Image (cartoon, grey):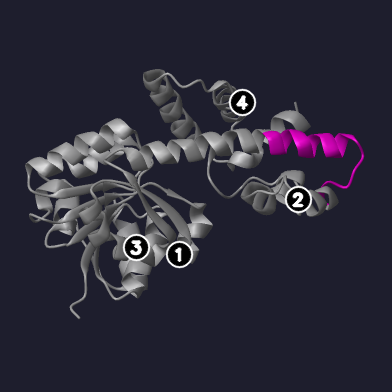
Amino acid sequence: MTAIKSAFIGLGVMGYPMAGHMAKDGQEVTVYNRTAAKAEAWVKEYGGTAAPTPAQAAAGADVVCACVGNDDDLRAVVFGGDGILAGMKAGAILVDHTTASAAVAREIDEAARDQGKHFLDAPVSGGQAGAENGMLTVMVGGEEDVFKRAEPVMSVYARAVTLMGPAGAGQLTKMVNQICIAGLLQGLAEGLNFAQRAGLDGKLVVDVISKGAAQSWQMDNRGKTMIDDEFDFGFAVDWMRKDLDICLAEADRNGASLPVTDMVNQFYAKIQARGGNRWDTSSLIRLLSKP
């Protein structure tokens, strides 16, 4: 069979390994990164080609994936003469893995339709480890026939790829994900801080309660590092604040009440004020252990 021609725009901690899985799958991958040295390093490791602009990376590709920082970053790589849409051929699919707003997803979807091209908003969950191990969860918004065409490309770096509804539905689902994580992390931080102040062996507590109803991914992967006061890894506070701001803005539009999410977002602002912008999101416990 002829190899799928694909492209990946944005080689950060998530995009770099995701694009790597595509190359290992035998796809003909062209990459673009704002810092060219990162793209050159990727090519040296995985093969493929590096392009000087998003448009040139997208040229000739059947599927173009993107994973950048926020709405503005996404617009910068999608629109304009050097943007992804300008380079894509008719009928090609843009799959956006950025965690962004539902509004920008619908904006890009409309622009793609006008040009005879296709778009899927497809934010991911699973963090850097999930990207590196090909075990991400992908939440997708878009048309079913387009989804079915792009699903084999996404499946090489994911354990679950699910169509959630029309354009924007992937981003809305990711918002639910972040809302749930925010409340869970605050509860975990309070519980572990309580355990330590009560004189319990915090790590033994984690071992015991993780076998019951309190178990979670965060407890399994962050509980013991929270007790050790280690936060130099994982999903950064800056990114979580960006995500929670998106959730709160969407809630203002749809009328949902997010009191705990709003409170936790303010706690993350306090972490930032302490210089913890790049600390892992589990650093919420620092506000309790070292008030």
Dot 3: few (<14), some (14–19), or many (≥20) neighbours within 10 Å? many
Under mark 1, the amino acid is: Gly
Query: In the rendering, at what x and y percent does residue 70 appear?
Result: 35, 37
- Location of mark 2 (residue): 212
Under mark 4, the amino acid is: Phe
- Location of mark 4 (residue): 267
Task: Kindly report the distance in space between the C-alpha atoms of the residues bearing marks 1 and 2.
Answer: 28 Å
- Location of mark 1 (residue): 134
- Location of mark 3 (residue): 19
Majority secondary structure of magenta residues: helix
Task: Kindly report the distance in space between the C-alpha atoms of the residues bearing marks 4 and 1.
Answer: 32 Å
Q: Name the residue rendered at 82%, 52% in the picture.
A: 208
Residue 85 colored in magenta in the image: no
Q: Name the residue rendered at 27%, 38% in the picture.
A: 105
Task: Kindly report the distance in space between the C-alpha atoms of the residues bearing marks 4 and 3.
Answer: 34 Å
| Of the pair 261 and 281, the residue shown nearer to us | 261
Task: Kindly report the distance in space between the C-alpha atoms of the residues bearing marks 4 and 2.
Answer: 28 Å
| Of the pair 82 and 38, the residue shown nearer to us | 82
Under mark 2, the amino acid is: Gly
